[in-house]
Every structure is written in C-alpha cells, then in structure tokens.
Amino acid sequence: MFLLSEADAQRVMSDQGLVNHHDGGTQRFRSSYVLRPNLGEMPIELLAGYEIFRADAWSQVWPGSRISIFYENNELFVPSDVELIAIFEGLGRAKDFDRIRAMKAR
C-alpha cells in the first residue's frame, strides 16, 4: 500500500490509464482512490484520500515520517516502522496484526 495525494492519484490514473477501484470502503477504513498498477509479481495498491474510522470520526491517514527504501532499483518512500505499526493497529484486521508481528520479528 502506498499513499498519494488525491491530485497525484488523478495524475497517475490519467498518465498510466489506471482504473479507480474504490468501493466506498468498510466501516473501519475508506479511500477515494484505489489504484492497482501492474508492476510485476508483488501486488501494489496506491491509495489517496485514505481514512480510518476511530473515536467515532473519520481521520485521514497521512504519515509524518518518510524513509527511503529501494525496490527493484526504484526509490520509494515509506513511513517509519513505528508509524506503520500505528496505521496497521488502526485497521484492526487479523492480517494487519500478522504484519505487525512480522515487522517486530525482523
């Protein structure tokens, strides 16, 4: 999952001919854009307008940290592990808790 601004999502969608797969979300999270570019074997989702429902209100997820990583010779920016864990905890799904355990085991 990669987070983009809504303006960047519109630009990527137009430039790459992608379809917006947003479906209204769930009771816990939603996005105004869900883009799924075909970048090889690893499934990638680009999300914009991403929000989590907590404390009886929707709050936008926009990481404050930015760590540079490289994947197949491409530089990508991701939130810190601490921030990713907080995001995954907010989602509250079993697969997110599995991700948290895997991150902590590294």
Image: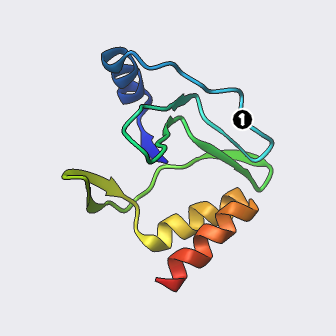
Count of labels in the image: 1
Q: Is residue 94 left or right of residue 98?
A: right
Q: Residue furthest left?
A: 73
Please state which of residues 38 and 78 is positioned toward the viewer in this rendering: 38
User: Residue, x 40% and y 61% (percent of image)?
Assistant: 79
User: Residue, x 44% and y 48% (percent of image)?
Assistant: 42
Task: Give above or below for 4 relative to 69.
Answer: above
Task: Give above or below for 46 relative to 13.
Answer: below
**Residue 98 screen position, x and y as percent:** 66, 70
Place residue 9 in its image quadrant. top left
Q: Is residue 46 left or right of residue 66?
A: right
**Residue 101 screen position, x and y as percent:** 61, 78
Please state which of residues 54 and 17 is positioned toward the viewer in this rendering: 17
- Colour scheme used in the picture? rainbow
**Residue 27 screen position, x and y as percent:** 80, 42
Place residue 11 in its image quadrant. top left
Task: Give above or below for 96 relative to 29.
Answer: below
**Residue 44 screen position, x and y as percent:** 46, 42
Please state which of residues 7 and 11 is positioned toward the viewer in this rendering: 11
Q: Which residue lies furthest to the front in this view?
A: 41
Q: Residues within 10 Å of mark 1 (few under 14, many from 20)?
A: some
Question: What kind of element bears circle 1?
Answer: loop
Q: What residue type is labelled 1?
A: Gly
User: Residue, x 44% and y 20% (percent of image)?
Assistant: 18
User: Residue, x 76% and y 47% (percent of image)?
Assistant: 28
The residue carrying mark 1 is 25
